[in-house]
Amino acid sequence: MLISLRVFIKAVRHLNITPQNFAELKKIILKYLTDSISEIELTKLQDWLSKPKNQNKFKSYIKDDYNLNKLYDTVDADMAFDKVWSGIEKQTRVMPLYKRNVFRYAVVASVVLLISLTFIFKKETPVVNTPIIVNNNIETGTDKATLTLADGTNITLEKGQNYIANNITSNGEEIVYETPNTAKKDIAYNYLTIPRGGQYYIKLEDGTQVWLNSESRLKYPVSFIDGETRQVELVYGEAYFDVSPSTDHNGSRFKVLTGDQNIEVLGTEFNIKAYQDEVLVYSTLIEGKVLMTTDTYSTELSPNQQTVLNVNNNNVELLTVADTYSITSWRNGVFSFKDMPLNKIMKVLSRWYDADIVFVNKEVENIHFTGVLGKEQSIENILSAIYNTNNIMYEINDKTIIFR
C-alpha cells in the first residue's frame, strides 16, 4: 500500500534514521541523480535538504568538491539545488525497494555528466561544428561471459539463457557454484572470461562473491578443499571480491593471485584492477584487512588504502584513498570520474562499449572531466554530453570513435 511521502518522513524520523556524515550524503545525492536511490535514501535526502544549513553544504559540494570553476566562468549552485529539490518534491510516493544483486541495483535512466548539466551552468558555448556519425555500430555493454570447463569445453553465457550442469547454475546474468554432494580430493579449475562490452557476477562454491568488469578473466576451483587455502587467480582485468570469511571454512585463508602480486585475506571486500594494456595494478581495500605481497614487497592494507604496483619495475606505492566509491562504482552500474583526463575516461568506456578510440587532436586528450555516467546509456548520449561541455569534435565510424 502506498503512503504519502510526508507520512513516511515522519515514520523515518521517529526511527531516527539519519545520515551519519556528509560523505554518506554525497553518495545519496549521486544515487538520486542517477535514478538508483531507494525510498529510505530518498527520504533521508529530502529531510536533510529541508534544513537551510545543509542546502549551503550541498551548494558548496557542487562548487568545490567537483572543481567546476576550472571549466566554466560561472557555476549556478542555487539553480542546481533548486533542480534537485524540485525533483524530490515531485516524488510524492514511496518507491518500491527491491533487494537485488548489485549489478542490477542501479537502474540508470539518464546520463548524468555533472559538468554538462544545463541546470548547473549558465555559460553557453557557441557551436562551431557538429559531430559526424558515419555508421554507429557501438552497442551498450551487457551481462555476458564465456565459461571454460576443466575439460576445455567453452560455454557461452548470455542474458536470457540458462545453463545448468552438476553444481553449476547460470541464469545468463550470474553464475553460482553449489557445494557438490561428494567431497573431491583433486581440484578442478574453471575459467570465466568477460569480453569487451560485458560484465558478470559469480558466486564461488565457498560463498565468495566476485563481480567481473569488462575484458577480465578469472581462474577458480569448481570446489574448494575444506581446511586448505582457497586460491583464485585474476588472470587479467578488474574484479571486486566479497570474500566468505575463513571462520566459515575451518580457518581456510583466501588468496587472489594477479601476475606478480599476491593478495591474502581472511574475510573482506576489495577491488583489483590489473588490465593487460596497463602497467599499473591497483588493489583497493574497502573492508577488513588484506596482506599484499610481491617478490620484494609486503604490506598489510587497512580500509581506504590502495597499493599501486608497477609491473615494469615491480615498485609498489601505498596510498590512502578518500573516495573508494569512484573506484568501485562500476559494479553498481555507474562510472564515476573525478577530475580525470578524457583519454583515461575513454579507455574505461572503450572496454564497456567494445569500441576503439583514436585521438587525432592530441590537445583534447588531457582535458579533465568530473561526472557520473550510467552504464546503460548509449555511447552517443555520453559523447554528446562531452561535446556540449567543451565543444570537442568527434566522429563515429563503425566501432571506432575519433576525436578531431
Image (cartoon, rainbow, N blue to C red):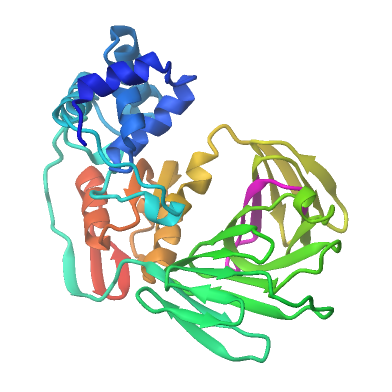
Q: Magenta part of the protein: which range?
A: 264-284
Q: Is residue 158 visible?
A: yes
Which x, y percent locates residue 7? Answer: 23, 20
Which x, y percent locates residue 6? Answer: 21, 19
Say if 281 sits above or below 133 in the image.
above
The chief SS type of the magenta part is strand
Say if 339 sits above or below 271 in the image.
above
Q: Give the residue displayed 13% in from the left and 58% down from the top.
A: 130
Say if 326 sits above or below 14 in the image.
below
Q: Nearer the viewer, residue 319 or 206?
A: 206
Quarter of the image for residue 11 reads top left
Q: Give the residue displayed 48% in from the left and 74% down from the top.
A: 170
Say if 54 sits above or below 187 in the image.
above
Q: Give the residue displayed 77% in from the left and 59% down from the top.
A: 255
Which x, y percent locates residue 141? Answer: 36, 67
Quarter of the image for residue 217 reads bottom right
Quadrant (top left, top right, bottom left, bottom right) of the C terminus: bottom left
For residue 244, side relative to residue 7 (left or right) = right
